[in-house]
Image (tube, rainbow, N blue to C red):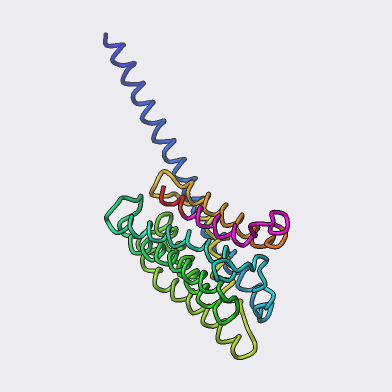
Amino acid sequence: MEMLHATAHNLKFFLVASLKRDFLSLEMILNRNKKVGLWLVMLITLGSLVALLNHGPIPQALSYHGFADRRVIWNISNFLDVLSNLAFVLVGLLGLYKTSGNDTINMIAGNSMSYKVFFMGVALVGLGSGYYHLSPGNATLIWDRIPMTIAFMALFSIIIGEFISIRLGSILLVPLVSIGVLSVLYWHWTEAAGHGDLRPYIIVQFLPMLVIPVILLCFNSRFTKVSGYWLLLSAYVIAKLFEHFDREIYAASGFVSGHTLKHVVAAIGLFILLL
């Protein structure tokens, strides 16, 4: 009997020691991943800034406004490019509803303001982009880009809060959104002065999309389900491909353009975050 008790005690001691060793090994791996992640984030940020500074000013090409589908339906110019922006309005309003306490969404309480600003930005993207597509040009493009930077920077704040530090994500919300809006105002001012420069706006739009995958891979989320962010990033890449092949898709389909599909796919990616 005593031998059985001794065996059981030794087995328990072995299991506890093994679990402690495994836990410490896992903790070391996680800490190492975080350090690697921080270094990668800093290198990507520094590399992007240096590359764009060395590139010189980048003006907005006027050809950007020449979309494939220019059909006028019900007296609305560029009808489908305008109409497809309703998807952003609907997703944004639904997100605001879910983050206002009327419904539930899987979010960190300390990051609630970032979520609200994010979905407000998404709803405003629909309005601003719809207005821009009624009469595409630099004068109206500013109203498309300001809401986009609000949404981009608020999403970045959410990711920082969920994966790195809740407090840091909350603190960075206002500075990040301010930088985003200022990048558009700077571009608009330089275009009006005759020497347009998109570089700050390019950083605001694309740097988070380069950094976020690193954060997702190297840091632990406070939630068990992070697939929504990967699906959102995938939707973003697909949407940019549709945008690039705007004319080819319209020529092939004869009905819908790549830019219209860009709006729809991007809105679907955003909607996935609410599921």
Is 173 rendered above or below residue 258?
below
Q: Position of residue 11 (x, y in %)?
A: 36, 21
Q: Residue at x 43, y 36 (%)?
A: 21
Q: Position of residue 207 (x, y in %)?
A: 56, 66
Q: Quadrant of residue 205?
A: bottom right
Q: Residue at x 62, y 81 (%)?
A: 197
Q: Main secondary structure of the magenta part?
A: helix
Total residue callouts: 0
Q: Residue furthest front?
A: 74
Residue in front for this viewpoint, 92 or 159 = 92
Bounds of the magenta segment: 249-270
Left or right of 98? Residue 33 is right
Q: Position of residue 67 (x, y in %)?
A: 66, 69
In the image, residue 102 lies in the stretch drawn in magenta: no
Q: Quadrant of residue 163?
A: bottom left
Is 219 rendered above or below residue 130?
above
